[in-house]
């Protein structure tokens, strides 16, 4: 997490920390931001984003519990949303290969975290432009996630493809598909078509 200086008196309208570092370290510092922000965080909406990688995938449910406990302490809950991102690319492709987690290994940890958050009424996004294919969430209608094709970001399309298994999936076109690099290195591993 990077800290940026705030101009004196500048309003903080929303706080979006990224948990791209080790979740435990990021969460430990989540509320340890510069003193100028402490009151603002308690008063402003917070969106927490986590890039799901090999180094944090096993910690997703614990992270969700910590988020719930942390924000339940406020009289008026300001947690706007928790989002989970699927890696798209890194500076070096070898870093992608080292960090990406096959979807079948992500599924139990990500769905567990989403389920915990949704049961507490927390909005969760994990299938949008930076998210996961819809089939990662199938099997439990309370956590199913689909996108609206008309809301897809144009920049997303070149990075996404549909595999052969996706051709028989009834979730299309409401699924973002697979990352090109994922298919290049892991093929269709973890894809379970709807229908």
Image (cartoon, rainbow, N blue to C red):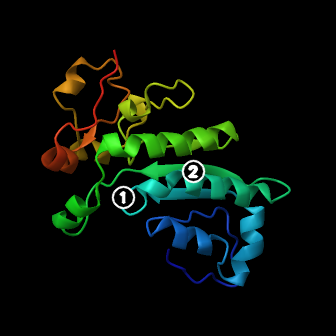
Question: Circle 1 — which element?
Answer: loop
Q: Mark 2 and 1 residues: CB-CB less than 8 Å, in contact?
A: no
Place of residue 82 in the rendered image (x, y in percent of width and height, measured from the top left) = 57, 51
Residue at the spot of label 2: 82
Count up the numbered dots.
2
Mark 2 residue crowding within 10 angstroms, few (<14) / some (14–19) / many (20+): many
Task: Single out the mark in the foreground, 2 or 1.
Answer: 1
Q: Is residue 13 left or right of residue 82?
A: right
Place of residue 142 in the rendered image (x, y in percent of width and height, measured from the top left) = 57, 27
Residue at the spot x=44%, y=41% of the render? 108
Q: Is residue 21 left or right of residue 118?
A: left
- Alpha carbon of mark 2 to alpha carbon of mark 1: how far? 16 Å
Place of residue 178 in the rendered image (x, y in percent of width and height, measured from the top left) = 26, 40
Residue at the spot of label 1: 53
Residue at the spot x=42%, y=55% of the render? 57
Mark 1 residue crowding within 10 angstroms, few (<14) / some (14–19) / many (20+): many
Residue at the spot x=22%, y=38% of the render? 189
Give me the disc on residue 1: none
Residue at the spot x=29%, y=35% of the render? 177
Q: Is residue 103 above or below residue 100?
A: above
Splitting the image into 4 quarters, where does residue 160 fall? Answer: top left
Q: Earlier in the sequence, mark 2 or mark 1?
A: 1
Which residue is at the far top? 195
Place of residue 128 in the rendered image (x, y in percent of width and height, measured from the top left) = 42, 41
Question: Circle 2 — which element?
Answer: strand
Q: Is residue 11 above or below residue 16?
A: below
Q: Is residue 30 left or right of residue 173?
A: right
Q: Is residue 87 above or below residue 135?
A: below
């Amino acid at each position: 997490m990077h800290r940026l200086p705030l101009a004196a008196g500048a309003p903080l309208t929303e706080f979006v920390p990224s948990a791209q570092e080790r979740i435990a370290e990021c969460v430990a510092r989540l509320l340890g931001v510069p003193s100028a922000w402490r009151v603002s965080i308690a008063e402003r909406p917070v969106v927490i984003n986590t890039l799901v990688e090999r180094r944090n995938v096993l910690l997703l449910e614990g992270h969700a519990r910590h988020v719930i406990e942390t924000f339940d302490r406020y009289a008026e809950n300001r947690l706007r949303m928790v989002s989970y991102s699927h890696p798209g690319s890194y500076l070096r492709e070898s870093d992608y290969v080292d960090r990406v987690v096959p979807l079948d290994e992500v599924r139990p940890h990500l769905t567990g975290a989403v389920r915990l958050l949704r049961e507490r009424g927390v909005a969760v996004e994990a299938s949008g432009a930076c998210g996961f294919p819809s089939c990662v969430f199938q099997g439990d209608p309370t956590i199913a996630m689909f996108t609206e094709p008309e809301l897809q970001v144009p920049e997303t399309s070149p990075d996404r493809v549909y595999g052969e298994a996706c051709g028989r999936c009834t979730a299309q076109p409401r699924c973002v598909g697979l990352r090109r690099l994922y298919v290049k290195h892991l093929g269709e591993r973890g894809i379970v078509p709807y229908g």
